Amino acid sequence: MNILNEIIANKREEIAKLKTRKIIEGFSKTKNYNRKTISLKQSILDKGFGIIAEIKRKSPSGGNIKTDLNVEEQTSFYDKNGAAGISILTDDKYFGGNVIDIIGCRKATTLPILRKEFIIDILQLYESKIYGADAVLLIGAVLQPEEANYLTNVARNLGLEVLYEVHTREEVTYIPPEVDMVAVNNRDLKAQHTSLQHSFDLINILPKDVPLISASGIKTPEDIAKLKAAGYHGALIGESILREGHLAELTKNL
């Protein structure tokens, strides 16, 4: 079993437990259910090239990254140093996150928040909305085309934007037409190998009518300049910022 299959198997167990405690009807009665969300798509476009800065404590590929991370402090740092939005990894077992982290992030910023999670059930979308997320990540590698379309439509109906992630040419062919943004993940989720070249290899077959984001393996201003020149509108960066704290350097010339 590769790491992605392992993560999804664990996620199905988590969702089964969640469904014993929470139902969709209960989510619709919470105060955040009708909250107007903030557009991540527009924030990226307004920047010309926007950086989605990530909050995560560890990862299967990177090991422990910043296990003592304080969500509100990290969010404030991102807010002050030019981020277009903030991505929060909410998986606990493999990334050290929690959906509660979104609450702390929301207290510290008015920037749009992306919930980065292995979303395979609509309950996770309702959960994302009521905890304060503005957008969600859907991953082509873990969804069948009909699942991807269904989850995209449910998310949009909840007022959540969708950042749809692809890694292979096959996944590009079934990107749901209603997604708000498309991300190329430079990391192979199965093999955990990362190459920035992957973004350049796929750029010519990506949709032209939505913002395009490159994710993983982006470390320098030179990387960003190359991505922008190739036609990308933004980058999702986590590990290099968390380890080096160089977000201001990456954004000062955008």
Image (spheres, rainbow, N blue to C red):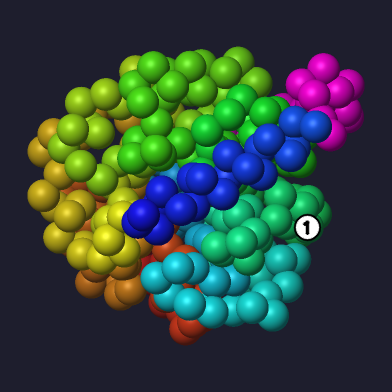
Q: Is residue 172 above or below residue 231?
A: above
61, 74: nearer the viewer: 61
82, 164: nearer the viewer: 164
Is residue 37 magenta-colored? yes
> What residue would you read off at disc 1?
104
140, 197: nearer the viewer: 140
- Residue 108 in percent (x, y) is at 76, 59
- Residue 147 in percent (x, y) is at 44, 22
Count all numbered tags in the image, as a single digit.
Answer: 1
Residue 28 visible in the current orientation: no
Residue plotted at (40% across, 70% down): 61
Q: Is residue 203 left or right of residue 162?
A: left
Which stretch appears magenta? 21-39
Residue plotted at (84% across, 34% down): 21
Secondary structure under the numbered disc 1 in the rendered image: helix
- Residue 51 in percent (x, y) is at 44, 57
